Image (cartoon, rainbow, N blue to C red):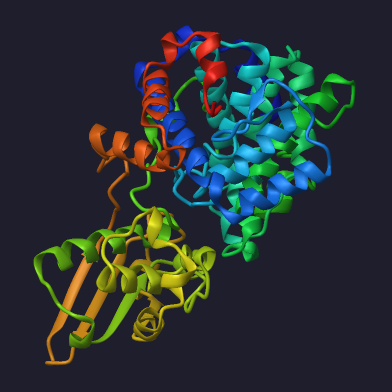
Amino acid sequence: MGTILEQIATFISSTKYEDLPESVIASGIMGLTDYCACAIAGVASPVSKNILSYLKENTVVKGPCSFFGTKIRSDLKNAALYNGVSSHCMDFDDVSWTTIGHPSVSTAPAVFACAQAGKWDGKETLLAYILAIEAMHQIAALTMPEVSERGWHTTIAYGVFGSVVPAARLYNLKEEQIVNALAIVASRSGGIRANFGTQTKALHAGLANRIGIDSAQMSSSGITASPFAIEGPDGFAQCFAGCSPKGEISLGKEWDLEKRGLVIKKYPCCSGSHPANDIWDNFLNKRHIKADDIESIEAGVSLLGPKELTCHLPQDAVQAKFSMEFALAYRLLKGPLSLSAFNSDDVQSPEIQTFMKKIKMVVSPELAKLGFIGTAPVRLRVRLKNGEQVLLSNDLAEGNPEKPLSQEMIYRKFMDCASGLHDDRTADKWFLILQNLPLATPEEIFSLGLVS
């Protein structure tokens, strides 16, 4: 049957658009639509401005690929890097429980860059994205949760494998060359979770895309690598997961986008706080208590919680996205969490800083029994000054396939993310192109993201 990478390469080179189930196509459309929204929303962020400054200092080469939400067109790798950073910096982008990471931001920037460079239509673009997701998730399915448990940021650790796919299709790589490209990125994978709460977390997504394209180009130039780079001695599985791959290849037999799907975020912050955000918001909508009424809040989380939500008394907007304490305090004191909620002035406000000290996040013994899971179930214990205790529980956030966001909410999220354009007609046009992606022309794909 061949090695893991050889089987993945065969899948990538042989699968046609007509082979895709309708449910997988629908997931792909949803993922790419959400990605574009997040890429546009992130343009004004400090890290997007910083990466643009870096690119200008190192010469932005003109090319056919859009820096989404700007007037800039550049080459494949620069566009993929920039769009990866801008789409991940708001932490509003989709999530996969297969990787406990962010699949679209680590692949879609490379997909759109290759699509614009190669003048692909909507079907070609969708196919490249779906194959990229399935390829990276196949490797994840064989090596998770150990990779995440050991501290790797899975968005880049697995994303590099996905971002190879569109470039491999753009350069018409043969199966042996695809294997080499995938094995090259196995040596370039990485990303440590210690950088959560800083701009480097967003950088990981951009690097994942640039590394994948770069590695496909290297393979196209004749550079070879080991087909045993995943399961071989000292291969990816052993080095990153500390174990041999678990199970067998399932590509073509089942689709991860159908079996597990994507989580579309309702809040622009780490998904580790989302079930808590939902249940806290529901409670406060029914019962209008004030900060002075509360003695303390204990947030019982699962094993992943302390590894993701690392900022307990955040001092800036980036840190606040990785803080259970800020999410709960802001909702009580300011209102529902939104894109505008995460700003340094509110984070540093005395009332929020004071109230966050009343909140303690702990690992719940009950939830610890579930193992290293990504769904972030929560048990909130709210102690009121009058002696009353309120117990709140939520096992799954809205936006999961089991609790999907409505089409109206998806549209509203897209338009909210694009509000910085000051041109609702352009945003609405992009949304319609994306929602009807199988019918999109190369000209429409080329028009995506570019501000006139």
Residue 247 in sight: yes
Is residue 19 shown left or right of residue 332? right
Seen at 52% across and 44% down, the residue is 102
Q: What is the number of callouts on the image?
A: 0
Residue 228 in sight: no
Tell me the quadrant of the picture where the C terminus can be found: top right
| Along the viewing direction, whichever of 105 and 373 lies nearer the viewer | 105
Q: Is residue 352 above or below residue 72?
A: below
Q: Quadrant of residue 174?
A: top right
Is residue 108 shown left or right of residue 93? right
Please provide percent x and percent y for residue 424: 37, 31
Seen at 71% across and 39% down, the residue is 231
Seen at 74% across and 32% down, the residue is 77
Q: Is residue 311 above or below residue 97?
A: below
Tell me the quadrant of the picture where the N terminus can be found: top right
| Along the viewing direction, whichever of 293 and 335 lies nearer the viewer | 335
Please provide percent x and percent y for residue 389: 16, 83
Is residue 180 shown left or right of residue 363? right
Please provide percent x and percent y for residue 155: 58, 46
Seen at 46% across and 29% down, the residue is 32
| Along the viewing direction, whichever of 320 and 276 lies nearer the viewer | 320
Q: Quadrant of residue 383?
A: bottom left
Is residue 313 shown left or right of residue 207? left
Q: Quadrant of residue 271?
A: bottom left
Please provide percent x and percent y for residue 396: 29, 53
Judged from this view, the residue extending furthest toward the bottom is: 386
Q: Is residue 66 above or below residue 211?
A: above
